[in-house]
Image: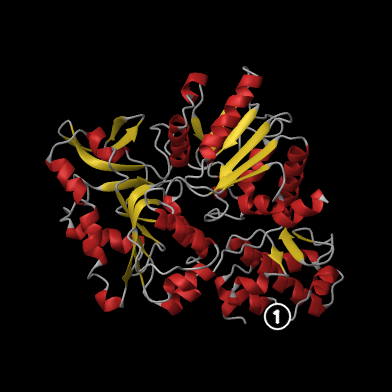
Amino acid sequence: MAESLQILDGSFSEWVVGNFSDGLEKKDCALLQRIAEAVSFSVSIKHTCLDFSVYKDIGEPLLLELLSGIKPKDVQRIITPAVKPLVASEDGSRVWLQKYYLFDQCVAQKLQVMRNEGRLQIITGGPGTGKTYTASQYIQEELEKNPKCLVQLAAPTGKAANNMMNALARSKFDAAAYGLKGLTLHSLLGMHGRSSKPRHNKNYPLACDLLVVDEASMIDLPMMYRLLAAMPPHAKLLLLGDKDQLASVEAGSVLADICCAFDGDNCMTLLQESRRFKDSPEIGKLAAALNVGCVPDMTANQSVIYHSLVDGSNQHAGWLEQALAGYRWIAAAIKKKEKPEEILQQQTKFQVLCALREGRFGVAGINRLIAEKLGVKSDGWYIGKLVIVMQNDHQRKLYNGDVGMVLDFNGDKRACFLVNGEAKAISRSQMPEYETCYAITVHKSQGSEYNHVMIVLHDDASAARANPVLTRELIYTAVTRAKSKIDLWTGDGVLDISAKKTTQRMSGLRHTLCLIGK
């Protein structure tokens, strides 16, 4: 076992044993160290606790190795209040790092209070089911009841916040007339720069009567804790999101946990009828099938075209040509000397989505190949280059996930972004951290939609089975980014394997919500 533990930072478990093992026998000290290492590792892979009832289903060999022979009764005996960095449930079935235990408890208690007081509403459903429209009706009702109602609109990313504002406008709700604007959660809470300490908290709450948060599936547990801590005691919270999409990048699966715990409650609204795919119902049918772990026959599907990735030797044969063809509109638009605004408005025509960042079929390699085929100059800053912002820049009002293009802007090569219908030009030296984005990860695509999506998965079924990224939630999220057409490139069996694998994060939130609600 020693060899496999080299990937862990053993200092935490050693610190726990060194400082909190008084009174334990030698064998129990060894068990304590293994439990501490397992909890630490669980947190490092985005779980919020160690759950003995499900950890075997997670498929992590290291957890299986660390916890071999350890039972909940051992946890009850070893993890006592004296072991301060670790907290165990009364039955020994769950173990938390102390801070995550506090997050779980505080979030669950606050949500239950808000639900009992009628201050919590959740609207969930797939793309095109009318989440934003339903939210706009709710906001207007609150404003009609109280014209002085202070409304705040927020989302986890700047891109998602902008998309929410656009969706509200399409719902015939003039947010600007009420002085409303979409903020990132970081901006809302006053978390600027590298500081994780929010300006707004329980001692200095937000100035709002109603807080509306879109793309709630992207919210991790620590962020939800900060958000709820900053809520005024009278304020209402409206969460919007698709519970079936990818979980947050960081720890937890907050929206899915909330929806499961409050299923059937008056605070929950589940929207099921989608208008997104009215012109391409086959995409909607595929998304619905994937949600229950099935892959339908797509041989007669005109909207979803299946392509086989045979093996590595054939990796550049078909999909690369198709990717290049998908971006021909860029060269055509530039040749016609269209205005930057007109070009940028076309960015949702086509997008390559990848499951992985690295590897033969990862974002990094595919972007390099496409750039090479486009005849990129050595400086890497060329007219027609697609770029995605990787870091929030509040000064320039550019946010993580914003997509732009390098264009000729008054005789100079500038990265142009569409902001409120106008092109915002940024010099290369002023750009925040960015990447080329002919291909992006499915995670980066959340909150966006495109006319035509090309999805590149994996060519090896056995590798797909072992890869934790290739899951039902990822495939579902990728498929539902497309409005009219999907080209799906994958190896034999990869799609079936991925559709049957669900993202299962060990979390105490769902259990705690249900426990408090009894």
Residue drawn 65% across the image and 50% down it: 259
Reading the image, the residue beneath label 1 is: 68
Residue 485: % across, % down = 33, 55
Q: In this view, does 222 lie to the left or right of 350?
A: right
Residue 191 visible (yes or no): no
Which percent across, then down, holds residue 439?
32, 56
Left or right of residue 232: residue 270:
left
Residue 349: x, y in percent?
29, 47
Quadrant containing the N terminus is bottom right
Q: Is residue 319 left or right of residue 126?
A: left
Amino acid type of the residue that numbered disc 1 sits on in the rendered structure: Ser
Side of 100 where 253 appears, left or right: left
Please say if 189 is above or below 126.
above
Q: How is the image coloured?
A: secondary structure
Q: Residue at x 74, y 57 (%)?
A: 511
Q: Could one spot residue 167 in this view of the protein?
A: yes
Q: In which quarter of the image is residue 93?
A: bottom right
